[in-house]
Image (spheres, helix red, strand yellow):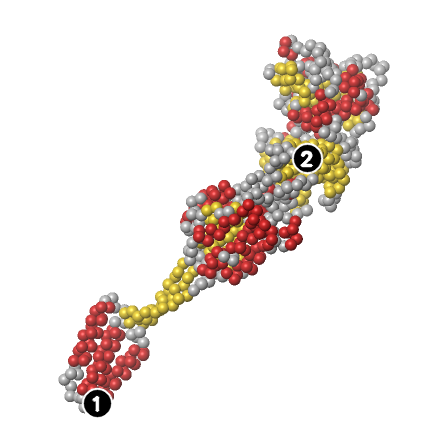
Amino acid sequence: MTGVDMLHRNIPLAAISSGRWALGTGHPWLMVLLMAIVAVVGWWSYQHQTATPRLKVAMASIRVAILVVVVVLLAKPVFVMIHTLRRPAVVAIWVDTSRSMCLRDAYTSSAKIKLIDQVRQALPVADSKTKRPTRFNLACFSLNQAAKTWLAALAKNQRVAVFTGGTHAHLLGMADSPAQLAPLLKRLAAITPNADATDVPGVVAGIFNDLQGRPVSAVLVYTDGRSTDSASVSLVHHLAKAGATPILAVPLGQVQPPFNLKIARAQVARHAFVQDPVAVTANIHITGATAVQSATIRLFQETKNHRRGKALAVRHITIHPGASQQTVSLMFHPAQPGDYHLVLMADPLPHELTHRGNTSRGVWTRVVRAKVRILYVEAYPRWEYRYLKNDLMREKTTLLSCLLLSADNRFAQEGNIPINRFPDTQAEMNRYDVLVLGDVNPDYFSAAQEKIILRFVGRYGGGMGMIAGPDYAPDAYRHTALAPLIPVIAGNPNNPMLAPPPDEPFELHLTALGRQSMLFHFFGSMKKNLRQVANLPPLYWFEPVAGLQPSATVLADLPSHRIDGRPAPLLVFGRYGAGRTMFSAVEDTWRWRYYHGAPLYKSYWLEMMRELARQRVFGGSHGLVLRTEARRVQVGQSNRIFLSVRDSELTGQMPASVPIVMTSSNGRQTVTLSAVSAGHRQYEGEVTPWVVGHYTLAAKPGVLPGTVKPVEMDVAASMREFASLTADPAALARLVAGTGGAVILPTRQSALAGLIPDRSIEVAIHQSRQIWNKPWALALLVILLTVEWILRKRAGLI
């Protein structure tokens, strides 16, 4: 039998029948008077007859009876049967089966501790010895206790409907008598709470809708009250008031924040080079910390069968009382190319409420073995050029072409890739991944070469960096075609605010983005990195600039020298079309190598070159770029999809909308991206996955005028149920307000009996049977007339 059938079947608990006589006339008292008159006349009619007194009495009595029967039949008598049927009301009970009901709270009040001990004793032996009971265990125990007392009393006269679910009400079963409560609650206890979301108002509204047309005495909810998806409470109040039904809530779970640790927002670069320092960052959310303790965060490589594999890094953090969040960074150096699927795990800590948040999966990076091809153009052999050229030539993961413009024609240009002039064709330029310009006079480049450079960066995803110098870079580029490639705005050298600073030592100051950048990740510890940056040899010269391009991000600045109220930028990254750009306002980082040796200097510039080459090496040279707002989302969480058109020649060929096919092991679906900017340069769409898995998003073949690289997205099980671990009795108080209900603690649930009315409906069914037109009435009249005739015959009156 379905839940709907169980809800709408009618089972009367009692049927009481009774009967009474009634007359069809509208004036029964007149009939009574008429019968009295007829009786007197009938008796009087035999007083003067010549018969024995005994015979006269008999004949007079019979005549009176005949006359009375005639009068009664003329009044059309009926016999009315009354059947009173009782339609029992329903007491609806909802037990929350969302995943948060699996939490095992550590209560502090003596009453709740006593109750928890009782629940633990009722659990199976395996659970009772090692674990605290869950919120769901507490709900089941409370109902089993009630089934022996007040709930059993209710079940004698009313029906008990038990619902489960997290966002929708699911009828588990109905109990029509106290004997049916035990098997129903046994079925309830066998359920494992697994709903990914909770909507307390929505569930209660669903119960009212399911019970439409039936009297509902009360709705009882056993829940922690924490809704992840919340419907309107006003709708619930309207439905409850319409049926005069009180809502009674039993809050489960602790109200004070429990001690717990959760790894959130784990991130890693989409791509990396072999032996690159790859940093995995994450936020550690902490609640309920009351004492200082240490925690260990580990980074593992996940195997193909989704098991924990090789350990890559480990970090120890200190948790202080009242702490709410820490950011951790774990670094590893991949030795082999391939896809690295990573797992962050926090070692379990004593007294944690749950360990579900101690693991973060779905973080991955693609590692490639590639040599970065660099073209370094410099005007003269300054110290920065000498040290940087030598280190890049010795580095096994780079290929270098040097073009020193001050050298004469007989000078053999240095580098791994011989060159004696700047590229004159796009094909020659595209042999490289990065272009580095020193203090070069912009007049050196022809108009054709400027276009080649612009296309190299903007269309083909190449990187371009500029190292400032005292002669040309960057001021001389202010009004040239290459100015958009420099992420800063060059100023007028005659501006006194932009005059070269005095020859005094200064140190790099890292911005928040600079502290996160791999350029300054010399060690696995952020503290060590910052300490190393602070201990770097001082610098003595930098080039002031007038401002920043819109795409600029500052990694290092000089707070002691301010331009228009802002610290002077020293290291700036930007973007032009598909490629990355960089500007270094300093030219003497060679001092780091001179005083500290090769490792730090080489690490800094090697990461600089890899950062600039990243877009080109990893597919950024495409004119069409597809990306997602997040690489990893949870079930039911929306994710935005973007398609950027970076090649202006393709904009006129783009359609109004672009279908994106999302494929996984569970099948495929199509998401449509719509143009959101003029000229069809940017497309956006949104998808909400509902199944856990690994998804590949690719443009539908034949739709776009060019190729677009697919992107990948991981969908994990929803953790919304554990975003907040405390109960929410305040939300339950708002739910029951105005319905005549109340919030009752589980330790006082016996008070529920007095708050649940009986709204059963009694229905009286009347069945009338007419008597006057029945054959036996005529037979009675004939019999009486016959008897009177016989008696009159014997008396000689006939």
Residue 652 x %, y %: 62, 31
Residue at the far left in the pictured view: 48
Q: Quadrant of the C terminus?
A: bottom left
Residue at 53% x, 59% y: name it. Answer: 181
Q: What element carries label 1?
A: helix
Residue 590 x %, y %: 77, 18
Horizontal arrangement in the rendering, residue 451 relative to residue 400 (left or right): left
Residue 51 x %, y %: 17, 88
Disc sitting over residue 793 in the figure: 1
Q: Which amino acid does label 2 sit on?
A: Ser
Q: How many marks overall?
A: 2
Q: Quadrant of the N terminus?
A: bottom right
Q: Say which quarter of the image contains residue 457.
A: top right
Query: How far is disc 1 from disc 2 in space, using C-alphas?
Result: 124 Å
Disc sitting over residue 294 in the figure: 2
Compared with 600, 709 (above or below) is below
Compared with 22, 136 (above or below) is above
Residue at 80% x, 21% y: name it. Answer: 597
Q: Is mark 2 on a helix, strand or loop?
A: strand
Horizontal arrangement in the rendering, residue 416 relative to residue 631 (left or right): right
Residue at 68% x, 11% y: name it. Answer: 501
The residue nearer to you, when weighing 202 against 157, is 157
Residue 612 seen in the figure? no
